């Protein structure tokens, strides 16, 4: 009786496609390594997050290591799977790369683009974990830079995921650029007949006496005034030492300033004439 033999598969050019020797034990080993990598990433993220809250002055710097650690752990896991578990030779690696390239071309190009975008973000650092950023119409604190998406927590405590590929193709504004300090701009609008000079004095006093404000030679408090046809805008530009105090600072200054405005007869504009959107009230100054 003739022995059964399995002939190697032939490729398009007539050459044999190498057998890479994948069996059930190989697949289990690969899945186990990926599971270990996932657990290691979760532990690293937890430890770095815990450490960042205790290294208060270096919180942003410590959080910068989170996406780098994730990339390094997953990269090492994939390298180990290809090199040690599958034991790919140079010829086999070329064959595997061809199959992977075909798969990417047909169905995974968007996923790969997102992963490449994540790598670019980690290396180029347009923002870091802990930064306050605006991506399109989404504003919030960056809590995670993953392989596929960046996650923000908005002021309304919503978790927003933005594709890394989209991030690279959109306008990005970074409020603190890796620094723990951040400028906060507070706009108050008063009637054009009110005493603008006194309003500026009150706003300055409310700003410099806030428990959240951070003032130094390089971080002064600036008060600006701008006239519009039917009202005036009084603007305070000041820094907080911890960017997480952005909204408590804004609330504190706004409340105390308006309490003083009311006590001194400084009135808000008449209803319906202030444009808070894309109109003149949104101009620079």
Image (cartoon, rainbow, N blue to C red):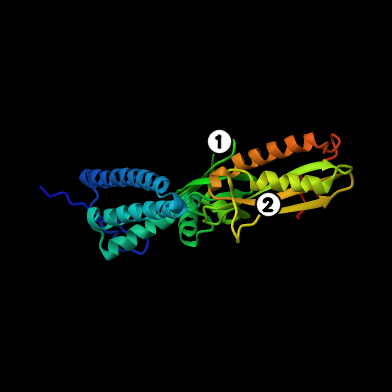
Image point 16% across, 49% down: which residue?
4
Against 266, residue 183 (above or below) is: below
One can see residue 129 in this view: yes
Foreground mark, 2 or 1?
A: 2
Residue behind mark 2: 237
Against 220, residue 282 (above or below) is: above
Is residue 143 or residue 85 the one in the foreground? 143
Is residue 94 or residue 154 the one in the foreground? 154
The image quadrant that residue 194 belongs to is top right
One can see residue 170 in this view: no
Q: CA distance from mark 2 to mark 1?
A: 25 Å
Determine whether, in the image, residue 208 is placed left or right of residue 266: left
Q: Residue 239: x, y in percent?
A: 61, 51
Nearest to N terminus: mark 2 or mark 1: 1
Q: Quadrant of the C terminus?
A: bottom right
Label 1: which secondary element: loop
Against 116, residue 48 (above or below) is: above
Image point 44% across, 49% down: which residue?
56
Image point 47% across, 54% down: which residue?
118
Q: Residue 135: x, y in percent?
A: 60, 49
Residue behind mark 1: 157
Label 2: which secondary element: strand
């Amino acid at each position: 009786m003739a022995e059964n033999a399995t002939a190697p598969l032939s490729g398009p050019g007539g050459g044999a496609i190498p057998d890479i020797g994948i069996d059930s034990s190989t697949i289990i080993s690969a899945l186990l390594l990926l599971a270990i990598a996932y657990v290691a990433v979760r532990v690293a993220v937890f430890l770095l997050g815990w450490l960042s809250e205790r290294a208060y002055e270096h919180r942003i710097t410590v959080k910068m290591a989170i996406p780098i650690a994730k990339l390094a752990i997953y990269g090492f896991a994939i390298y180990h799977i290809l090199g040690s578990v599958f034991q790919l030779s140079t010829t086999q690696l070329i064959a595997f790369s061809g199959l992977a390239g075909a798969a990417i071309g047909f169905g995974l190009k968007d996923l790969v683009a997102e992963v490449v975008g994540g790598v670019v973000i980690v290396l180029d650092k347009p923002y870091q974990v802990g930064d306050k950023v605006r991506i399109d119409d989404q504003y919030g604190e960056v809590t995670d830079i993953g392989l596929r998406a960046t996650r923000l927590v908005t002021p309304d405590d919503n978790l927003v995921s933005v594709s890394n590929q989209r991030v690279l193709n959109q306008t990005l504004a970074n409020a603190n650029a890796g620094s723990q300090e951040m400028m906060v701009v507070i706009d108050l609008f008063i009637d054009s007949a009110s005493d603008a000079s006194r309003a500026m004095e009150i706003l300055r006093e409310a700003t410099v006496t806030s428990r959240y404000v951070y003032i130094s030679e390089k971080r002064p408090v600036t008060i600006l005034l701008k006239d519009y046809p039917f009202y005036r805008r009084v603007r305070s530009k000041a820094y907080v030492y911890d960017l997480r105090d952005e909204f408590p600072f804004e609330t504190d200054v706004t409340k105390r300033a308006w309490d003083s405005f009311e006590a001194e007869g400084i009135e808000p504009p008449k209803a319906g004439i202030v444009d808070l959107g894309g109109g003149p009230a949104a101009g620079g100054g």
